[in-house]
């Protein structure tokens, strides 16, 4: 057993069998690792997109069009990158493509997708699709959506109008060229997670002057017979009867419930050359039977006898104190079940922000249209959450300001109304915020309690009606 980590402390810590978030480009690595180490799916999901179309334009003279879909991702800086091509469907104006595009869905990112449909010329039918030069093919139209917009649909399907821009430079007209349907499916073969507590009894001592420092490594066996580690427990010092903290194994992660697992018990050494105390080979189904039967399994140690290794049965035993299976639902499961996210915002209008009429103020409205810090925060958070709120009516408040001829208010409706606090859409928040700057005087102090109480009342009222909603309150303030 080689080094587990580069330092002694790290080597003695437990390591989950979680999939590395770096492989999927997740932007919340620490949170995702914590969730996965507890058997919970992380903040992202793999989504498989499939495509079909109806009423495509017929661009061929003696036959129907031969369509292909090309998928692009539009980055925040405006760059458009091609990421996928379907196969070509011959002679069809109502194609259903077989090839699927897999994309990682991130809740916290607005992922802009552009789809272009091309009619592939007959002379290129024997060319691989990835080698086709798109400028040599005829455009049948294009469509745009965000991934959030797609996954929030009840059936996760979105039908888009294909638009074809007029080729004339002077023309601003566009033509409707049929419809493209995009369907999303979450890629999970199993959402079941096994929660297991393992312990050993009567471990043999591998240290000369003290007891062993045992830890377990759980590996899965692949077809070649090679074992691939998927989980490691923490090290328990000087313990011949250790009980380790729970381990969480996703059943998809190990293959299946009947897939063979090798559980090895090592004695920890700081030089990285850990001593094998003993091992067993069991599947998750076997471990469940050990738990139900309250029985232990004797460890064995491969021992060289002559020129061959034989398994020496030890007195040491592995026991399963807990085995339970749970289904971990993903964020997309909750969306499919009808849950919504309601966005609420509260903005700091205290005098510490500076005079709004001066350029050095955080509330300064730039005539050039450049957003100030508060506007950026509203826009960047709002553009993510807006897809998860069906009516897009957002409660919006201000605090720490003095309305005209009134006392300082620590929670006032941003729209100026005394009866209701909601505004329509992200643009409605922006307009109400700008209007409030001209109708209140910045004051203080900075107090959050009033807006938090008001937000909790809104959430409680929704709960009393049985609505399936989560509420996210964004408080934007100046930290000094």
Image (cartoon, rainbow, N blue to C red):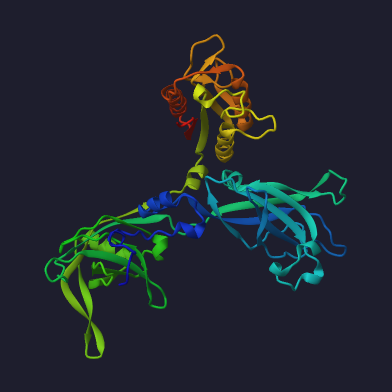
Can residue 8 be seen? Answer: yes
Q: Is 469 on the left or on the right of 284, as rendered?
A: right
The outermost residue toward the left is 209
- Which residue is situated farthest in the bottom direction here? 306
Q: Is residue 328 visible?
A: no
Q: Residue at x 18, y 76 (%)?
A: 313
Q: Nearer the viewer, residue 293 or 463?
A: 463
Query: Residue 240: x percent and y percent?
Result: 15, 64
Q: Is residue 116 left or right of residue 372?
A: right
Which quarter of the image is occupied by the N terminus? bottom left
Residue located 51% across and 39% down the image: 338
Q: Quadrant of residue 66?
A: bottom right
Q: State which quarter of the image contains the C terminus.
A: top left
Frontmost residue, 130 versus 349: 349
- Residue 324 percent location from the top left of the image: 30, 54
Q: Position of residue 304 (x, y in %)?
A: 23, 85
């Amino acid at each position: 057993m080689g080094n587990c980590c580069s330092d002694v402390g790290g080597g003695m810590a437990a390591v989950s069998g979680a999939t590395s978030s770096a492989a999927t480009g997740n932007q919340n690595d620490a949170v995702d690792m914590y969730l996965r180490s507890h058997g919970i799916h992380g903040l992202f999901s793999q989504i498989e997109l499939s495509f079909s179309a109806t009423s495509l334009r017929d661009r061929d003279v003696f036959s129907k069009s031969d369509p292909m879909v090309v998928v692009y991702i539009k980055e925040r800086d405006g760059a458009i990158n091609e990421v996928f091509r379907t196969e070509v469907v011959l002679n069809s104006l109502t194609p259903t493509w077989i090839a699927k595009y897999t994309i990682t869905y991130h809740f916290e990112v607005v992922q802009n997708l552009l789809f272009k449909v091309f009619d592939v010329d007959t002379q290129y039918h024997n060319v691989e699709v990835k080698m086709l030069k798109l400028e040599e093919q005829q455009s049948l139209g294009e469509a745009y959506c965000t991934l959030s917009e797609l996954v929030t649909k009840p059936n996760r399907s979105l039908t888009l109008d294909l638009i074809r821009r007029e080729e004339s430079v002077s023309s601003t007209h566009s033509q409707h060229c049929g419809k493209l349907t995009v369907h999303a499916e979450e890629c999970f073969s199993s959402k079941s997670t096994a929660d297991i507590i393992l312990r050993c009894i009567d471990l043999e001592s591998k240290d000369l002057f003290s007891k062993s420092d045992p830890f377990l490594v759980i590996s899965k066996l692949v077809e070649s017979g090679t074992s691939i580690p998927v989980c490691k427990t923490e090290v328990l010092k000087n313990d011949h009867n250790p009980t380790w903290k729970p381990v969480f194994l996703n059943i998809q992660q190990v293959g299946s419930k009947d897939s063979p697992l090798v559980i090895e018990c090592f004695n920890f050494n700081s030089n990285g050359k850990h001593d094998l105390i003993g091992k067993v080979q069991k599947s998750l189904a076997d471990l469940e039977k050990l738990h139900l039967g309250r029985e232990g399994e004797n460890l064995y140690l491969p021992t060289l006898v002559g020129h061959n290794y034989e398994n020496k049965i030890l007195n040491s035993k592995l026991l399963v104190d807990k085995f339970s299976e749970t289904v971990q639902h993903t964020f997309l499961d909750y969306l499919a079940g009808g849950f919504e996210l309601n966005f609420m915002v509260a903005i700091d209008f205290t005098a510490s922000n500076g005079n709004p009429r001066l350029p050095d103020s955080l509330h300064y409205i730039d005539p050039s249209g450049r957003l100030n810090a508060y506007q950026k925060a509203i826009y960047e958070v709002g553009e993510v959450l807006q897809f998860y709120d069906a009516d897009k009516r957002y409660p919006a408040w201000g605090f720490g300001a003095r309305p005209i001829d009134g006392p300082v208010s620590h929670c006032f409706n941003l729209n100026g109304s005394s009866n209701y606090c909601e505004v329509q859409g992200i643009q409605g928040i922006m307009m109400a915020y700008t209007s409030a700057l001209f109708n209140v005087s910045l004051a203080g102090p900075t107090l959050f309690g009033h807006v938090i109480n008001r937000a909790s009342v809104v959430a409680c009222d929704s709960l009393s009606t049985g609505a399936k909603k989560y509420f996210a309150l964004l408080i934007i303030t100046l930290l000094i």
